[in-house]
Image (cartoon, coloured by chain):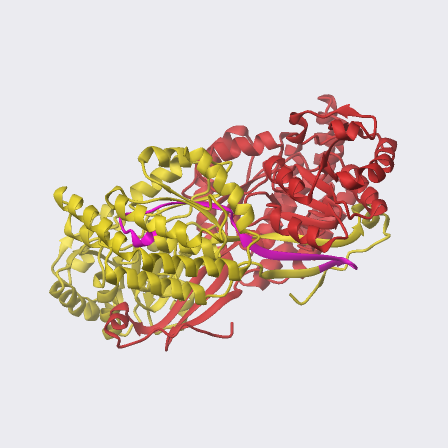
Chain colours: A red, B yellow
Amino acid sequence: MQVHEAARAAKEASYQLAALSAEQRNEALRGVQKALRAHAEHIFSENRLDLEAARAEQLAAPLLKRLKFDEAKLRDVLSGLDSLLALPDPLGRTQLARELTPGLNLYRITCPIGVIGVIFESRPDALVQIASLCIKSGNAVLLKGGREALRTNRALFAALEEGARDILPPGWATLLETREDVSDMLAQEGSIDLIIPRGSNAFVKYIMDHTAIPVMGHAEGLCHTYVDAAADTDMAVRVTVDAKTQALAVCNATETLLVHRNIADRFLPPCARALEERGVEIRGDAAVRAIIPCLLATDDDWATEYLDAILSIRIVDSVDEAIAHINRYGSHHTDAIITDDPQARDRFLSGVDSAGVYVNCSTRFADGYRYGFGAEVGISTGKLHARGPVGLEGLCTYKYHLIGSGQTVGDTVTGKIQYTHRDLKP
Amino acid sequence: MQVHEAARAAKEASYQLAALSAEQRNEALRGVQKALRAHAEHIFSENRLDLEAARAEQLAAPLLKRLKFDEAKLRDVLSGLDSLLALPDPLGRTQLARELTPGLNLYRITCPIGVIGVIFESRPDALVQIASLCIKSGNAVLLKGGREALRTNRALFAALEEGARDILPPGWATLLETREDVSDMLAQEGSIDLIIPRGSNAFVKYIMDHTAIPVMGHAEGLCHTYVDAAADTDMAVRVTVDAKTQALAVCNATETLLVHRNIADRFLPPCARALEERGVEIRGDAAVRAIIPCLLATDDDWATEYLDAILSIRIVDSVDEAIAHINRYGSHHTDAIITDDPQARDRFLSGVDSAGVYVNCSTRFADGYRYGFGAEVGISTGKLHARGPVGLEGLCTYKYHLIGSGQTVGDTVTGKIQYTHRDLKP
């Protein structure tokens, strides 16, 4: 099937999906669980073939680990589906209820976005996770996974289709397989409502530049931790070490540490020791190098997302200077302050223009699971629609229902009826 | 000042605006009211010069009417500001409050988007309306008005700046004047967060195609009214006449009427009479022409937003056929069903993929004032962020505050701390 036909079919399916009950959508999720269990052996054996091919192509060890889909991964996927089943229905919620004039009531009701196009990386479990979020939120979906996982993705997708077959309309999901498919998908602005790319910054930026369809994703994760003059030094060290080293190649790791001049003498030496024990290379400005030995940071460092065991450090004179640095060089993802000063804290919370602004904790908490969203389709650094970790809610929009009994605007002009704008109980 | 400097200054100002209290923002609005009153005579005389020039250029009468800014318009503007002052603060609202683990609490808090670029048509009162919505929602703004209103806009803008001078940070608003300014503005994706164009479809589409900045607007308003088999005929006629004729060149006027075959004989003759009395030209399909005399509608008619005294009419066999027609040819703006049948009504509400789905009332109600939003910056036919009439809420986003006491993700991995995900009272 051509991509434009698949997109058109998904659009048709989306209208039927929107009319399904929460119970029907949950039933489909249970069907998917059942089919995954039934076809587990086939999925594992296809995955072994993908792994063999990947090894032959000398794929790096971390990528091989992500590619692997075994008993343990299946257990995670099935338990993820359990969590999703337990979440309340995101659709049909009344966000606003208002009488416009007697007998004419306005309701704002959540509903699916429609058709989502998702391009994801090598992890095949992402396929099930994303498709199941779409089922729960009533969206049709076009999925494009990594080339290395092609056999595994096909096997998972077959199970997904089989499990949902009797409940979801045909065309609700399509697996795309080639790069050309992706280009074609980006041109379907008449049928696809939202593109969610998951991958490198360069890749996300490429997608954004090559489609008229709205894109939800993050182009970068350049996070900061700012250690204020009024910080607890021990806490600041512990949180900084976690924010930098708990995982390296992740978007919510801290890449630049800002330190208030008045605490630098006390804080930097123990912090540098703890970081160096964990193999972190430090690049500091001149003021930092006057306190601890390290490489010299250049302007480029402030603008670099290392995704590696490297941390840039800069000394600042005030919380305002820290805020200005973060807003200038950061990626509006997640930034933290370590402080016991309520004034510095409030200034930081209102001044930092990021999806997540944290006080006395690690930037690594920026994640849909950790936020209790059940699952996430990604983290948005855009400001419109969804910001930060995006779960089910980000896959929904709303529509206005206006329910009347023959009201006309002409009658409001003549004064025959008058606006009351009285809020109703939702 | 160059546009990129103005945009940069607006970005700087936006960080300060975000920290102002509701009372400070309201104080700025009261300052604007005072300055508009103080400079009323100057504004009127500048407007007379604009009007003279426009008459010399033989501007059409409706445009001249929109361009006029007199005592009456000023009264409207001042009372609009009163309404805005009375609205609750859209900022700092807690949308979600959740304990992630004891002592680590997540809050989702509304905040301004940042910098808004607005391009508006000839009505100079729109300048005050949009700028004041931005003040109330804490956003900085770049404003580009119509060329015909240049003198009036300058006078209004001077009053605006003077009225807010002591409260809002410098650079919070800039008036742009040339077409080149607009092109430059569209390239400031580093500083401007959202573009709101108001004007013709072609214009909005042009803007969308020429910027990497998110655009909120509607590309078209092709609205439908569907008269179901179970409609009250009298109500259907009244509502149809209002939806088509209460105003013509507006995005929420009905352009296509769909009629169920079983009611066509009873409904079409009186409806056609009422429409023709008001000078409406009817274009029907063959089945319509078998009942009433009219021009023949072609496929082009179903896809045309007339913005004029023309109505296309098509006979359908079911509510599903009506829904399919609307989703295929419509613009996802506002569509209505006239029916007394609860099943047809529910099917229509869930099946029609539009920002507004109405039952037994006129599509002309799709409007921010009529919805009780105080004012609107436009109507969005996009599905992300804001949908339908966009008021203050559409000019806001949110950020996540995560407030802890030294929590690390490492401690959740070792099990030293556990996720509770307990919802707190906001």
Q: Nearer the viewer, residue B139 or B368?
A: B139
Q: Position of residue A376 (x, y in %)?
A: 64, 48
Residue B215 drawn above or below residue B310:
above
Left/right of residue B10 with respect to residue A257 in the rendered view: left
Please determine whether, in this image, residue B121 is positioned above or below residue A178: below
Q: Residue placed farthest to the top in the image?
A: A57
Tell me where residue B249 sits by quadrant. bottom left
Residue A164 visible from this viewpoint: no
Residue at point 49% right, 37% down?
B8
Residue B125 image point, x, y percent: 31, 54
- Looking at the image, which is closer to me, A253 or B420? A253
- Residue B105 is a magenta residue: yes
Asked if the stretch drawn in magenta spans residue B59, the answer is no
Q: Is residue A406 above or below residue B298?
A: below
| Quarter location, residue B252 | bottom left
Magenta segment range? B99-127
Q: Is residue A13 visible?
A: yes
Residue B95 point in image, percent of width and height: 60, 61
Residue at 42 percent of width and 56 percent of height: B133
